[in-house]
Image (tube, grey):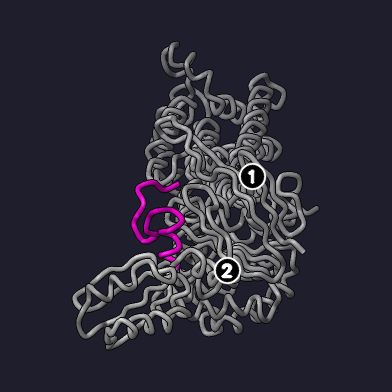
């Protein structure tokens, strides 16, 4: 299919840019390790007191955090290409406009998938015990979140007015920080006051984290898992449609 | 065969104040295969906007066009397969190498990796970029970058190439070099070239036909030579020994002399077809016993044409830009 070939062209270009930069690669792979090693031990004390296995509570949140801050900021990589006129140049070629988005999203997903696996493997070494099936579905949810966040991140960049790309960082931060705090990533929302828990219900990631906590515990058929999957899939579809629309907008 | 046909092409948009700006107000023209045609106009005239419409980057708000045989509205994808485009600030990824950019561009045009690579090498050689094949694009000089931009626009051997202000920002030598490459596109490869420029000398040097565009409309259309002939006027400068005022009296209104100005002992005559009438004018002076010391005929420039047609100098910066 023509579209897949076009995605392949963009994917290969994005991957080669990434792999070429040893700095980027190192940073990308160290990130999950740092989260685990620097925050994990601290959390153990807090969570263990409530009786739950700290790793099963923390690692799902950590994976979603990885997605949020990994995929949420990918828009940055679009800005130099946009400014240099590369996107405009490619728009005049027959390449599919959707491929311009999806080739990039594919790269982001591959990178995030690799990071997620590194993180989970390290968590295993540090004491996490979770069933493979649960892990697989959980990582599937993370991949869906990565697709969403990546597409939304690029959409945000394109939505910014011309010559205002510097606004990407503050806007992204303003959106991502509350998302992180309200998703129950660091601690389950049920630990906090009722009103905070209620507010967090509008954040899709909350459902993803809860679903993954159940999955890590080996429970597959709970309401939380169902909700989490539905939200992850719904968000992915929405983001992909929105992303496709922003990439094809100003075109004849 | 018509390579481009535009009918009533127009583009308007809303600016920050909510007002409607008509960047292009209904442009009609055609370009035949094998021509080099130029859009000439000051900044803000609507050249880039028109070019972007014809290359599918912007949707026209009115009008229609056929580009390289494809209808612009009905088959923009078809247009894209047939044209090459070198934008005003054409884009290359800063850290990619010259060759990588060319190969990827080829792949975007559905060329296989091998074909794209072979074609890239061909273009590198044709545009004197072979030594820069492995250089990162951000390290190229202005002239080299422009040649790379052209190479990118030609990767799939298009029959129609659009160039938006190709020599802006280049030093004189690079400009002349670039013009040579543009001429070769048509001379060696039979491509049709449509370019936009605000440089009068560029339009004069390259174009078979010039479309003068001002404030979103085409206001004149002809070959540079014809435009200068019909709309400009030659200036015949005659330096006389003495009797400047008598010389002026004798010449005023004769033989198509539109205007006589005096600078010291030199008469500046605005004459249509001055190069042909010069001899007769000198004879008139001679009959009146005025001794001409020297004579010079200056042909009109496109700036004169522009001034005649629009009432403004093309070289004056314009307040509005689209």
Residue range (magenta): B302-322
Q: Quickly name the residue at label 2.
A: B223
Q: Residue at x 53, y 18 (%)?
A: A201
Give me the chain letter of mark 2. Answer: B
Left or right of B238? Residue A224 is: right
The chain carrying label 1 is B
Alpha-carbon distance for marks 1 and 2? 22 Å
Q: Was residue B316 drawn as part of the magenta stretch in this picture? A: yes
Q: Residues within 10 Å of mark 2 (few under 14, many from 20)?
A: some
Residue A39 seen: yes
Residue drawn at x 39%, y 43% is A164
Q: Nearer the viewer, residue A170 or B311?
A: B311
Earlier sequence position, callout 1 versus callout 2: 1
| Label 1 element class | strand
* Disc 1 target residue: B8
The extreme top residue here reads A194
């Amino acid at each position: 299919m023509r579209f897949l070939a076009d995605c392949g062209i963009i994917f290969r270009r994005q991957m080669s840019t990434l792999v070429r930069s040893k700095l980027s690669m190192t940073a990308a792979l160290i990130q999950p390790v740092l989260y685990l090693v620097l925050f994990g031990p601290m959390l153990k004390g807090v969570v263990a007191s409530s009786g739950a296995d700290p790793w099963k509570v923390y690692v799902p949140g950590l994976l979603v955090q990885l997605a949020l801050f990994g995929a949420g900021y990918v828009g940055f990589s679009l800005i130099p290409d946009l400014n240099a006129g590369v996107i405009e140049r490619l728009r005049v070629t027959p390449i599919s406009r959707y491929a311009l988005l999806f080739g990039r999203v594919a790269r982001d997903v591959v990178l995030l998938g690799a990071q997620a696996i590194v993180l989970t493997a390290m968590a295993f070494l540090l004491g996490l015990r979770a069933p493979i099936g649960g892990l697989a579905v959980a990582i599937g949810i993370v991949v869906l979140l990565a697709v969403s966040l990546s597409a939304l991140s690029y959409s945000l960049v394109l939505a910014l007015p011309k010559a205002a790309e510097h606004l990407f960082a503050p806007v992204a931060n303003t959106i991502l920080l509350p998302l992180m705090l309200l998703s129950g990533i660091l601690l389950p929302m049920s630990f906090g006051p009722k009103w905070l828990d209620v507010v967090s219900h509008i954040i899709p990631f909350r459902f993803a984290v809860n679903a993954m906590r159940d999955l890590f515990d080996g429970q597959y058929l709970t309401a939380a898992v169902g909700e989490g999957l539905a939200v992850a899939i719904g968000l992915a579809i929405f983001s992909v449609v929105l992303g496709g629309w922003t990439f094809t907008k100003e075109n004849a | 065969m018509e390579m481009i046909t535009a009918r009533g092409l127009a583009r308007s948009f809303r600016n920050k104040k909510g007002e409607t700006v008509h960047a292009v107000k209904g442009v009609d023209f055609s370009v035949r295969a094998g021509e080099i045609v130029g859009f000439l106009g000051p900044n803000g005239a609507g050249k880039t906007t028109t070019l972007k419409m014809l290359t599918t980057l912007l949707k026209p708000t009115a009008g229609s066009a056929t580009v390289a045989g494809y209808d612009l509205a009905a088959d923009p994808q078809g247009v894209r397969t047939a044209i090459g485009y070198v934008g005003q600030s054409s884009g290359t990824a800063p850290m990619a190498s010259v060759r990588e950019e060319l190969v990827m561009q080829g792949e975007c045009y559905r060329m296989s990796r091998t074909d794209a690579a072979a074609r890239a090498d061909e273009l590198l050689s044709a545009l004197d970029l072979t030594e820069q094949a492995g250089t990162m694009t951000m390290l190229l000089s202005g002239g080299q970058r422009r040649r790379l931009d052209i190479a990118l626009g030609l990767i799939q051997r298009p029959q129609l190439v659009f160039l938006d202000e190709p020599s802006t920002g280049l030093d004189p030598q690079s400009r002349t070099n670039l013009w040579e490459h543009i001429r070769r596109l048509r001379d060696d490869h039979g491509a049709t070239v449509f370019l936009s420029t605000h440089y009068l000398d560029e339009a004069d040097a390259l174009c078979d036909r010039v479309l003068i565009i001002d404030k979103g409309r085409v206001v004149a259309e002809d070959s540079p030579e014809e435009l200068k002939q019909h709309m400009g006027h030659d200036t015949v400068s005659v330096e006389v020994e003495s009797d400047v005022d008598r010389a002026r009296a004798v010449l005023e209104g004769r033989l198509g002399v539109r205007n006589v100005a005096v600078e010291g002992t030199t008469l500046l005559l605005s004459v249509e077809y001055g190069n042909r009438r010069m001899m007769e004018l000198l004879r008139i002076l001679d009959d009146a016993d005025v001794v001409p010391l020297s004579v010079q005929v200056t042909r009109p420039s496109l700036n004169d044409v522009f001034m005649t047609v629009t009432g403004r100098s093309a070289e004056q910066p314009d307040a509005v830009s689209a």
